[in-house]
Image: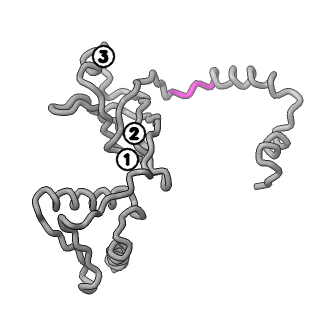
């Protein structure tokens, strides 16, 4: 019942505002897809809940349920995960299984995949990609991701390497009180 009440509130808000900019990315994209289908096929959709007819959203070729375009900006991302699939019949892409973002499809080109000397399937890799990010919410548009570069990535923890970096950095930190330094960065703000 809680889900139905929540969805009814969303329908009411979209109806009152005649806007979907406040919705989370996946919900807004679903409504945009219905709007596109409505225009293409001359369909009318009526979305309602079991509560009452007043909680209804109508999407027709005359409505314009699209997000404001200027809130999406170009962004650069770094992803770490296991390469699960590469290729595609009409559109070449790679599929990366990540802990943080789940399963991502990242657009690439067929030529790039042909020129790979090593089979990277089922190996841990890092990927640098570009895509769209919502300026207000920080959400990523996973459908806009394009490969920029594959990065050699070895997720193995190396305690010897870490200790060497600590010894190397110690010289630069001599005579600096870490607490004072952090407080100066915070501008006097204490956590």
Q: Report the Cα–Cα distance between label 2 and label 1.
A: 7 Å
* Residue 105 location (% of width, % of height): 30, 38
Residue 150: which quarter of the image?
top left
Circle 3 sits in a helix, a strand or a loop, which is it?
A: loop
The dominant secondary structure in magenta is loop
Circle 1 sits in a helix, a strand or a loop, which is it?
A: strand
* Magenta stretch, residue numbers: 156-160
Tell which residue pokes out farthest to the front in this image. 62
* Residue 30 location (% of width, % of height): 27, 59
* Residue 38 location (% of width, % of height): 16, 62
Q: Mark 1 points at which residue?
A: 141
Q: Name the residue under label 3.
A: 116
147 or 5: nearer the eye? Answer: 147
Q: Is residue 14 found left or right of 168 in the rendered image?
A: left
Position of residue 133 relative to residue 40, above or below, is above
> Which residue is at a point 24% across and 77% down the rendered structure image?
48
Residue 104: which quarter of the image?
top left
Position of residue 9 relative to residue 76, above or below, is below
73 or 62: nearer the eye? Answer: 62
Which quadrant would the C terminus be assigned to in this image? bottom right
Mark closer to the chain start, 3 or 2: 3
Q: Mark 2 points at which residue?
A: 131
> Which residue is at a point 37% across and 56% down the rendered structure image?
25
Within-10-Å neighbours for mark 1: few <14, some 14–19, many 20+: some
* Residue 84 location (% of width, % of height): 29, 33
């Amino acid at each position: 019942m809680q889900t139905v009440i929540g969805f009814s509130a969303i329908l009411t808000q979209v109806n009152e505002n005649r806007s979907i900019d406040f919705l989370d990315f996946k919900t807004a994209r679903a409504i945009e897809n219905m709007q596109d289908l409505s225009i293409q096929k001359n369909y009318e959709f009526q979305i309602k809940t079991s509560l009452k007819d007043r909680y209804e959203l109508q999407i027709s070729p005359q409505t314009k349920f699209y997000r404001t375009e200027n809130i999406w900006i170009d962004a650069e991302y770094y992803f770490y995960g296991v390469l699960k699939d590469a290729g595609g019949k009409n559109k070449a892409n790679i599929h990366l299984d990540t802990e943080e973002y789940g399963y991502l499809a990242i657009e690439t080109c067929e030529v790039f995949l042909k020129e790979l000397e090593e089979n990277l399937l089922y190996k841990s890799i890092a990927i640098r990609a570009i895509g769209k990010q919502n300026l207000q919410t920080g959400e990523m548009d996973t459908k806009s991701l394009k490969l920029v570069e594959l990065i050699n990535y070895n997720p193995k923890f190396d305690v010897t390497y870490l200790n060497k970096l600590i010894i190397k950095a110690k010289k630069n930190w001599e005579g600096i009180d870490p607490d004072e330094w952090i407080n100066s960065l915070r501008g006097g703000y204490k956590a």
